């Protein structure tokens, strides 16, 4: 991150790669320290992950770089696959924290492709999470998790327009419908066996 900041004017492309890689390494380190090696308490790790999400958003805003934001988000979503899933609730909380960083970014910048990428990654990771831990967690835990993801992306697709008083475009409506449809379909699938 320091090298990226130092070279921000001389090598703008390298700056984005270094900064995005630095954010990804921070996500990886905190996740590993908590979920894999039990070096720090989970709630401390969540606080650190929130700080990293805020730092990633601040750097993307500072450099006005969607590429940096995408590198940070992709790095964050790849971390659980590189080191193992951890516990069920840890992985779910991790996804929610990363999504909060996306919410922060999308509130200030009109980067709809970043929001779409994060939504797809969140839904895929939730599906993998449920495939791995579905038999070990309660229906309530799964439904609360997908509801929080849904609500974060409701904010990510609407807050920018409300705060900055902008009119949504067709792509924004597509994101909103995709989020709502995914939430409906996943919730229906989760509750079908017990409550159909």
Image (cartoon, rainbow, N blue to C red):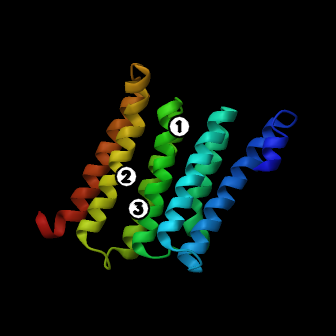
Q: Give how far across and how far down residue 9 sits, in percent.
A: 83, 33
Judging by the rendered image, the residue that carries numbered circle 2 is 149
Q: In the picture provided, is 11 more to the left or to the right than 69?
A: right
Give the quarter of the figure containing the C terminus: bottom left
Q: In the picture provided, is 43 more to the left or to the right than 192?
A: right
Judging by the rendered image, the residue that carries numbered circle 1 is 113
Q: In the picture provided, is 142 more to the left or to the right than 72?
A: left
In the image, which disc is placed on residue 126?
Answer: 3
Tell me which numbered mark, 1 or 3, is placed earlier along the sequence. 1
Q: Residue at x 61, y 40 (%)?
A: 58
CA distance for labels 1 and 3: 20 Å
Q: Are marks 1 and 3 in contact (CB under 8 Å)?
A: no
Q: Secondary structure at mark 3?
A: helix
Q: Secondary structure at mark 1?
A: helix
- How many other residues sit within 10 Å of disc 1, few (<14), some (14-19) or many (≥20)? some
The residue at the far right in this view is 10
């Amino acid at each position: 991150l320091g090298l990226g900041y130092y070279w921000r004017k001389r090598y703008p492309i390298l700056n984005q790669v270094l900064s995005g890689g630095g954010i990804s390494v921070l996500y990886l380190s905190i996740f590993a320290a908590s979920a894999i090696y039990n070096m720090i308490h989970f709630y401390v790790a969540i606080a650190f992950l929130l700080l990293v999400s805020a730092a990633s958003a601040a750097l993307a805003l500072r450099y006005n770089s969607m590429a940096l934001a995408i590198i940070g988000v992709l790095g964050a979503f790849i971390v659980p696959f590189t080191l193992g899933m951890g516990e069920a609730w840890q992985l779910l909380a991790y996804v929610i924290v990363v999504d909060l960083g996306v919410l922060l970014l999308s509130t200030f910048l009109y980067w709809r492709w970043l929001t779409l990428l994060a939504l797809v990654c969140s839904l895929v990771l939730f599906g993998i999470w449920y495939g791995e831990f579905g038999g070990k967690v309660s229906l309530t835990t799964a439904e609360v998790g997908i509801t929080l993801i849904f609500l974060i992306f409701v904010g990510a697709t609407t807050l920018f327009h409300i705060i900055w008083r902008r009119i949504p475009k067709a792509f924004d409506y597509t994101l909103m419908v995709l989020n709502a449809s995914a939430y409906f379909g996943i919730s229906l699938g989760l509750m079908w066996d017990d409550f159909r």
